[in-house]
Amino acid sequence: MTGIDFSVLTKKEPEKKLLRPLKNRAGRSRSTGRITVRHQGGGAKKLYRVIEFSQKKINIPAKVIAIEYDPNRTAFLALIQYPDQEKQYILAPQDLKVGNEIIFSEKAPLLPGNRIKLKNIPVGTMVYNIELELGRGGKIVRSAGTAAQVLAQEDKYTHLKLPSGEIRKTNGECFASIGIISNPEHRFMKIGKAGRNRLKGIRPAVRGSAMNPCDHPHGGGEGRTSIGLKYPKTPWGKHALGVKTRKRHKWTNKFIIQRRQKKKK
């Protein structure tokens, strides 16, 4: 079992005004109450941290007063304070330290944490928390250790290379934050024991091949046998691997310049 280096975090309680209750729905649909995501339930209680993914305060510098842990995501958070004493949580990039100043502006220095319009960011710069629609806040590149790279500026669009390898066009008027998201060691973390997964709200999953034929398409047979099928299936008989899930005629297809490459087996 391995953990994460929390030495960069500030030793303080979370900001009380920026906390909200978070109900555990255990994989159940809010409308019907039926399980729509299997193997979820239990886990340690958590409070939600209200995070500023957009840029409500433009051209006003803010000071970083703490770097904090967030149980709801893989990245760390930075607590910033404006001159009027208002505080906000933002996603913390690497190399952002307590005492640093950040600013959200159309044009700003290329320093970690600053939020700038994509059209004003030089080619080759690493960015995160990127808006896809103007004014809707950052929607992509928000997990630990990730970043997108600015590849080109063309007309009103900025070309970005996303962490998946996909290259897509984004409106240059949209905002993005400079830098690479904090906690890059998260990808090397080993859970190590079942109890740690239970604390995260993940329940045990039984292999389909260990079930009876009436419970799963992989079930049945004497002893430890193969699934006996040409391809793996879900419990409901659908293809389990290699199925495209993106809508064929999605309206955003026109913004994708190059699809992500399939991983070699």
Image: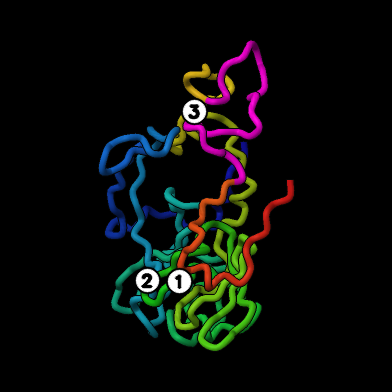
Q: How far is the residue under mark 2 from the one under mark 1?
A: 8 Å
Which of disc 2 and disc 3 is earlier in sequence? 2
Residue 85 versus residue 40: which sits nearer the camera?
A: 40
Q: Which structural element holds mark 2? A: loop
Q: Residue furthest right?
A: 265
Question: Measuring 62% from the left and 81% from the top, which residue is drawn there?
Answer: 152
Whether the magenta-drawn stretch holds residue 241 is answered as yes
How busy is the neighbourhood of tag 1: few (under 14 within 10 Å), some, or many (20 plus)? Answer: some
Residue nearer the viewer, 265 or 67:
265
Q: Position of residue 157 (x, y in %)?
A: 53, 82
**Residue placed under numbered mark 2 in the picture:** 136
- SS of the residue at dot 3? loop
Which segment did they paint magenta?
217-242
Report the number of numbered marks.
Answer: 3
**Residue at mark 3 to residue at mark 2: CA–CA distance:** 37 Å
- Is disc 2 in contact with disc 1, using a CB cutoff of under 8 Å? yes
Reply above or below: 19 against 56.
Answer: above
